[in-house]
Image (cartoon, grey):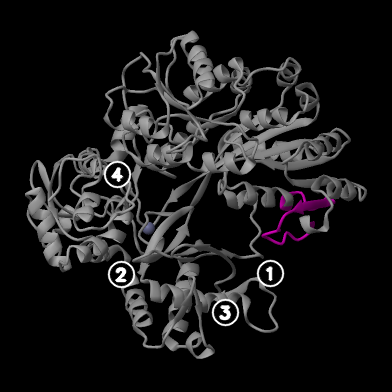
Amino acid sequence: MTQPSSNHWLKDVARHAGLDLDLPRRPPITAIRSVWPEVAKACRLSDDHFTQRVAGHFRIGVANVAAYDPQAVRMIPEAVARRYGILPLSSAADTLVIATSDPTNRGAHKEIVAHSARQPVFMLASPAAISMALERAYAPARAPKNALRTLVARVAESDFQVVTNQGKGLFTSFELEDPAVVKLADVILQQGVRYRATEIHIEPGAQQGRVRYRIDGVLQHVVDLPPTAHNRLVARLRHLAFERPDHNPDDGFLIEAGGETSKTAHLLTTPTPDGELVSIRLVDPNDVPSLDGLGFDGPEDRKIRQVLGRSEGLVLVTGPARSGTTSFIYAALSALKNQSVISLEGRPETVVPGVTQIRYDPMTGISFAETLQQLLDRSPDVIHAGEIRDLPTARIALRTAVTGRKVLATVHTSDAVSGIRRLIDMGLAPGRLGESLHAVVSLRLVRRLCTECARPFDGERDAKSREAKLASVLGIAPVSRAVGCKGCAGTGYRGQVPIPEVLVVTPEMKALLGHSPNDMELQRAAQADGMRSFAEVGLDRVQKGDTTVEEIERVLGIVPTRDETADSVGPVLVVEDEAEDMALMSGVLRSIGFEVVEARDGHAAAELLEHGDEAFSFILMDLYMPGMNGKELLRSVRQSLATQSLPVIVLTASANPRDELEVLEAGADDFLLKPVMADRLEARVRAVLRRSGVRLAK
Ligand SMILES: [Zn+2]
């Protein structure tokens, strides 16, 4: 059927049938799922016959996906099964029989071994068959969704005609009021509120779209959505959000979920080639976060309250998106509301009683910094200066903070020290910063174990769990395990726990800032002053039974899982297409004692990571490269179990804050602006390695 080739086998099969597919060499299951019917059609075979043909080619059996053993299903987490489009069918002592549409996927192979400690025995099934079987196999935890699937099917099969025009449906009002569509939209919205979702995503797909809820910060699959149902649902939602008379779309629309529960929904739509991507933010504008409610504890709780209690100085709040910075700011403003408080924001999400909240509108043509300056004429005691994006705003914030006022502001950086570094990189003199900066609070959020269903860790029963493995790497005793019940939507977690890093500027720190310190010196001084790292605070919460090591690992990625005992450090993988930069970086790294492996682009790096036998200590990668760029490489690094905790520093030539936010969100540990300065590079490398628990000899 195929000749040996560097292409993916499905591409070769398609070519034999006269079809030229645009398929990457290692396609994700979504790509295979979307081209599979096309290739079967080009081969003039039914789905069943095509499946048999492919199975014959690989000399493996055809799977009966209806006959799966729930015991086997439990060995592979649902997220992994969905990511690779695989279904566990049965298990033996050393093997796990797995239905797959792509027996050549090495990533799937690795994850199966990692999760089940068994070798996979693959059998073939079509992507559509596996997709349907997955719904049933993993359904028991999500029983209420069966009703939703029935509704989706009704909407998809309604016989009114939908005329599509470049992904946008043209609908008559009759269609928008079709009882099935109305019911589907209502159920998705109300169930989202009941499950405490903060976002609902309605995602299109060529063959199959889906609905997902973000619950406690993590996206959870709710139901698959065929394109017809997707178009109709989106039209209905747009109608609810934008198209009703006497309604201002900016205000959002109210969702009543029965009883006392209601939320306001804000709809955002983005066109994609497969249709419209809709994300709905669910907020309760009257639910003002409080410091008590956020759940800080220990020394950080005391420090935060002391910091907020002081009447002047700049308090910088840092963290990537969805790390709790917004809630923290609102809680802080609310705690200070007895003074005169002004807040300048892009779009206030919550109404904080007692606080004057001003919405900044860039359309006025007045800059953020100018608007801020004008507000200072009202002489507030406390001002929230929003996100500091430019030097003028930073300067005003500093100036205000030394004149007897308290200033709260955010920057999007990964930790406390990089928050200080960001302001210095913007052009502030470190000495001046030391005069005004009072503290940096950096935040992460992990999920809180559901108190209804969490159970104590059982040394015997849980010996092979990931929780046990991660805890042993860290040398701590696991305490509790997540289970999942109706109250927590089957996730095992309910609510979130803040993990703060609190850096307070002491006289010693102020003196140090006067000497333009590097990041490592700052980090060391902060820790000497008692700042606990994210990892220390997080593992403390594990020991208190509030969360799990798995959760800490998911958010912080701190656990070095590769070589757990070696004191020696592996080589660095440097990915860079420009020879000059490559030479500079390799030189610096070699001078501090690293071996360096060079890759000229993302593909070469991915190849080394997947097939090389080097245990790298970290990756230094350029963001913009021809072929596979840094973002794609980063994504693939974070998706593979073998490399997901490998530290990554990204280099970027532009000072575009969006890029930086994106790479931090995608899992980079830090980033560095070009041109690369040798001392800066060295400091970042050391800081990232220390945060990641990699020991450096010198
Ligand atoms: Zn629960």
The residues bearing labels 1 and 3 have C-alpha atoms spaced at a distance of 14 Å
- The outermost residue toward the front is 18
Task: Please give the residue where the numbered disc 2 appears in the rendered image.
Answer: 143
> Mark 4 or mark 3: which comes first in sequence?
4
Which label number is shown at residue 643?
none
Upstream in the sequence, badge 1 or badge 3? 3
Residue 387 in percent (x, y) is at: 71, 45
In space, the residues marked 4 and 3 are separated at their CA atoms by 40 Å
Span highlighted in magenta in the image = 334-359
User: Does the CB distance between marks 1 and 4 fall below 8 Å?
Assistant: no
Q: Is residue 667 visible?
A: no
Q: Give the class, few, some or many, for how many residues have Cα within 10 Å of label 2's Cα (few <14, many ≥20).
A: some
Q: Residue at x 15, y 47 (%)?
A: 2
Q: Which residue occupies the extreme right position in the image?
A: 377
Residue mark closest to the camera, 1 vs 2: 1
Q: Residues within 10 Å of mark 4 (few under 14, many from 20)?
A: some
Residue annotated with mark 4: 26
Q: Is mark 4 within 8 Å of ligand 1?
A: no
Label 2 to label 3: alpha-carbon separation: 29 Å
